[in-house]
Structure formats: C-alpha cells, structure tokens
Amino acid sequence: MSGTCLASPSIDPWLAHTVRIASITDEVEDVATYHLEFSDPESAKSYSFLPGQFNMLYLPGVGEAAISISSDPAQEGTLDHTVRIAGNVTGALARAAVGDTFGLRGPFGSSWPIEACLGGDVILVTGGIGLAPLRPAIYELLNRKSEFGTLSLLYGARHPFGLLYPSEYADWEQRGMSVNTTVDRASPAWQGNVGVVTQLLDRMPLPNPEETTVLCCGPEVMMWYTARSAIGRGIPADRIWVSLERNMNCAIGLCGHCQFGPTFVCKDGPVIRYDHVSSFLRVEGF
Ligand SMILES: Cc1cc2nc3c(=O)[nH]c(=O)nc-3n(C[C@H](O)[C@H](O)[C@H](O)COP(=O)(O)OP(=O)(O)OC[C@H]3O[C@@H](n4cnc5c(N)ncnc54)[C@H](O)[C@@H]3O)c2cc1C
C-alpha cells in the first residue's frame, strides 16, 4: 500500500472543520472547483494532505460526501475540490455561493505512490473528472521533476468541452510533462486524437516498461482496460495503481459501506495497487 492510510493520528476524524468558499471556478458542464479557506486559522495551520487523499464535505441538513482534493499539496493555504453534480450533497454545493460555509472532515485515505515512482517513467491515465484526484500528483511530480524519468499524462473525455483544467496544460508541458488528450466525439474545431484513452497508451513508446509506473483514475472499466494494456506492454502489475470510488459514510473503516472484497476503500484506498484488487474489478456487484 502507498503512504498513509488514515488521517494523521493527531486529527480527530469525527471533527468537522468549518470552511468557507473563497471562490468558485466553473470548469465544464456540471463541474466546478471550490477553493476553500478554513475559518479557524489553527485548523488551517495544522491541515496538510497527500496527493490522492480525500475529504468528507458536510453540508448541514443535507449530508456528507467524499470528495478528492484537487489542489497542490505544496501550496499552503490552498484547498480545492473539483465536484460534479451527482446527487444531494454535490447538488447543494452547486447552489452554494462564495462566502458560504460548511463542514469538512479529513484528510482520509491512501495517496498516490510518489516515492515508488522515483527514478522511473510515470504515466498518468485518466478520464473525465478522474483528472481531479490526479492533479495533486501532477503538481508534486512536476515540483520534483528531476527525481523522475519521463512524465506523461494520457487524458480522455467524452468531447472537447469535457476536458478539465485546459488552461494548465501548457504550463505542465513547459515544466516537463507531456499532455496527450483524446475525445470520444470531436467537435468541428478539434484537431486532436479521437478514441478511447487506452489507445494513447497502446501507441506510446515505452523504453523502460519494467521501471514505469502507471497511476490511473477513472471509470472502473477504463482502469481495467488500462491495466490490461499496460501489462501487455510489459509494465509489471505491481507498478500499476488505481483510485477506487465507493459510497462511504464514516471514512475510517467502521461502517463497512465502502467494502470492496476484503478492502475498505476509505482506509485501504482510494489509491490501491492494481494487483491487490484486480480480481474484484470486473465482478458485478463489487
Ligand atoms: C474517495 C472518493 C473520492 C471522490 N472524489 C470525488 C471528486 O473529487 N469529485 C466528485 O465530483 N465526486 C467524487 N466522488 C464521488 C462522490 O462522493 C459521489 O458522487 C457522492 O455520491 C456524491 O454525493 P451526493 O450526496 O451529491 O450524491 P447522492 O445523493 O449520494 O447520489 C449519488 C448517486 O445516487 C443517485 N441517487 C441519489 N438518490 C437516489 C435515489 N433516491 N434513488 C436512486 N438513485 C439515487 C444519484 O443520481 C447519483 O447517481 C468521490 C468518491 C469517493 C469514494
């Protein structure tokens, strides 16, 4: 397993910090990024997270939802969540305005295995809103670029207007990550790739597959095909990491809502080594 598996022991996992919406960025249809500030300066000081971890966002009178952190862990004072409207909590968040406050518990869960990537090539494969939980890893890899080999992002969306954070791609490229996008359906102006994201993986040169790490986040079927393609190209299964999503309540391994085979997504995940969950990934009901 990667880095930490629980919130820092010094943090009470039941304690909801009050956060204020400092600003909102509309990303794509039904998706916005909420830039949050802690109301209590002490909470702000003590809070830190690792790439891939998530918070439980608590909207009083509505409920709680697990949402990944999408900002740069090295940027003190910034805490972003990129949220797609799915139901009650995310819908209520979409109706919130700058200045509104709500509760936040966390951070929870395991993190992307940045240290396991050291010295090798790293490929991030993702689709749609799956880029949000990977964005902190992108920042960390770029902040420490000299410690890794080549960095490649393979990113697919249904259509060109579904690609998240397009204004950042030039910066990521300039700092040393190749950004390769593809869409299922092109618009008239689209000049890039059309097709599923795994085609980008199938086509890219892989000079050192045994020392390449894949970080993958998206629909389970996409992660399954990505892993199959990566293994077919010679990348070891124990160098492939996926981020899982399951409905969860407590976020600390007590309630069992997010159980996935023998794994609790909230505390053993969400980031899990592919070979630890591969046998459950395509089983209906899991
Ligand atoms: C570790 C983790 C990280 C995550 N990160 C993110 C993230 O970064 N961004 C993000 O947008 N999401 C993220 N999610 C997903 C998010 O937690 C879910 O979408 C969550 O369910 C949203 O809560 P909600 O209250 O808005 O939706 P809910 O009200 O729980 O609805 C969820 C789904 O259930 C359906 N539903 C709701 N009520 C009913 C009903 N009465 N009958 C039938 N169907 C119903 C909805 O249509 C919807 O499809 C993450 C999940 C996990 C586990």
Image (spheres, helix red, strand yellow):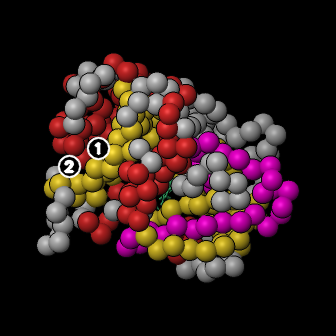
- Quadrant of the image containing the N terminus: top right
- What amino acid type is highlighted by mark number 1? Met
Counting from the top left corner in percent of width and height, residue 271 is at 50, 37
Q: Quadrant of residue 231?
A: top left
Q: Is 264 situated above or below 169?
A: above
Which one is in front, 251 or 159?
159
Residues at badges 2 and 1 in contact (C-beta under 8 Å)?
Answer: yes
- What residue is shown with label 1? 222
Q: Please state the extent of the stretch shown in magenta in the rendering.
A: 28-56
Counting from the top left corner in percent of width and height, residue 166 is at 37, 63
**Is residue 113 at all visible to an observer of this figure?**
no
Few, some or many residues within 10 Å of mark 2 (<14, 14–19, 20+): some
- What amino acid type is highlighted by mark number 2? Val
Q: Is 123 situated above or below 238?
A: below
Counting from the top left corner in percent of width and height, residue 4 is at 64, 33
Question: Does residue 69 show up magenta in the picture?
Answer: no
